[in-house]
Image: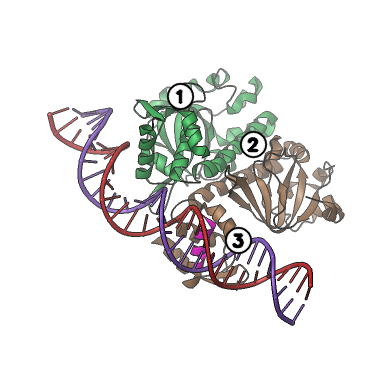
Chain colours: A green, B brown, C red, D purple
Amino acid sequence: MTHNLSLKEAWSGIADCENCELRQSALFAGLTLQDFQHVHDPIIQVVLQPGEALYRDGEKGKRLFTLRHGLIKLVRYLPDGTQRIVRLVRSADTLGLEALLGQPYEHNAIAIQEWELCCLPAETVNNLSERNPDLYRELLQRWQRALTSADSWLTDLSTGSARRRVARLILRLAEPAEPHRCQLLGREDIGAMLGITTETASRTVAEFRRKGWLTETAHNEYVVDIAAISADLAE
Amino acid sequence: MTHNLSLKEAWSGIADCENCELRQSALFAGLTLQDFQHVHDPIIQVVLQPGEALYRDGEKGKRLFTLRHGLIKLVRYLPDGTQRIVRLVRSADTLGLEALLGQPYEHNAIAIQEWELCCLPAETVNNLSERNPDLYRELLQRWQRALTSADSWLTDLSTGSARRRVARLILRLAEPAEPHRCQLLGREDIGAMLGITTETASRTVAEFRRKGWLTETAHNEYVVDIAAISADLAE
DNA sequence: CGCGGAATTGAAAGACGTCAAACTGTGTGG
DNA sequence: CCACACAGTTTGACGTCTTTCAATTCCGCG
């Protein structure tokens, strides 16, 4: 993981924070200008490519991150070498919260799409949060969001037949507004998310496509017939 | 859910907190005597029987809880009526953290074994935590613990063949010291935890018993041959 | 144009779910 | 004290779904 390239464009840092496009949804939404004066360490923006790891399971965590663009998977590797995807992190989500507690990271954070993120020293966030109730509350909120996500990952995506799992995954990935675009992942990743094999994932997606529930518009990008898939789920 | 019986023995309340046997592992471990003066609302201990619900999915949460004895399952019901157990809560664990954020509870909390717990008004905990860094940190810690538990629930108990899942569940429930006692749950609950049917759960447990890996000592209580089961998992 | 990784497809074996029946232990009432 | 009912467990048979292993096709990229 080389930061070289990214470090150059990095020091937009603190200044950017105040005018951040994600300001409202970002971790620091509640901070005042005065608060920012306590931010001594830089807040770096890094960009990495698909397949690269942001951090690894077991590394001692000193930073947490807010994702600005892109998609990251949190992965655990099983003893037999296969992977299980535990969660997806999307724009405006936070990852690496365990760093705040001085604990090692518990997943491998690996890029799916190219991304860009803000990197916050745990120390800084800790200090700020003890002084600032808004930030404190925001942190709890984010922890809870991760927990909710983990729970629904279990009930939605790891329960029932393979077809139901794929159906629920697609509904979850599809854009809420018409036309319901849906950026699908590699079949191996789909399998790792749903706890099924790559082949079964592929077969199921292909079947949906043949039924006309999915129409490919670009590489791995589809338009979804949400009504049809929902109806199939309801049976 | 009637509190009548329990309310009688309840008002040990605050005083008890300072001498609580769980003091070290409890949420309030970091509180000072002075802090306790801010606790105006009572801290109640309730006792309920297996099958009864502590709270329900969707109820607006005003309290969080620390379990003192017993076992609670956090359940979500699927559209088709079946249940999926999302997590188990054991002694000294906290549940209902979402109440701190003013959010409705996200699970049904249902007793498996008879239990006893402390009931903390969210309001009180919120007030205290803004003043007390130790409590604040302890809260983060507990949120993280729940998250870790959720993640390993997914990777350990919802991945791989039914036999592997059951094996991992047993290892997780077994006492760490010799003799490795293990209090197993009803087959339906085992199924709901592992995402398999009651019958498959029953068959698998029966098979383990026939192989001598499990020896029943009392109703649903077994001694576990950890070495054998681990070896089976490793294959 | 050809290479390589990903996706698709096929066939066969195995695992799991489903439905139904038999069994067990527990508690109840006669 | 026994008979009975009941709920949970166990077991069997069968069908379906999923995995496995292998072969083939597809697509982006050099």
* Residue nearer the viewer, B41 or A133: B41
The spot of residue B62 in percent (x, y) is: 75, 39
**Quick check: do tags 1 and 3 share a chain?**
no
The spot of residue B194 in percent (x, y) is: 52, 53
How would you rate the neighbour count of disc 1 (Cα within 10 Å): few for under 14, some for 14-19, many for 20 or more? Answer: some
Which is in the foreground here, disc 1 or disc 3? Answer: 3
According to the image, label 3 marks what residue? B186
Question: The disc labelled 2 sits on which kind of residue?
Answer: Leu
Image height of A89 relative to A151, above or below: above
The spot of residue B126 in percent (x, y) is: 74, 37
The spot of residue A202 in percent (x, y) is: 35, 40
Looking at the rendered image, the quarter that the C terminus of chain B falls into is bottom left
How would you rate the neighbour count of disc 3 (Cα within 10 Å): few for under 14, some for 14-19, many for 20 or more? Answer: some
Q: Residue at x 55, y 40 (%)?
A: A152
Which is in the foreground here, disc 1 or disc 2? Answer: 2
Report the predominant secondary structure element of the magenta stretch: helix
Q: CA distance from mark 1 to mark 3?
A: 56 Å
The magenta-colored residue range is: B196-206
Asked if marks 1 and 2 touch (Cβ < 8 Å), the reply is: no
Question: The disc labelled 3 sits on which kind of residue?
Answer: Gly
Horizontally, residue A138 falls left or right of residue A113, namely right
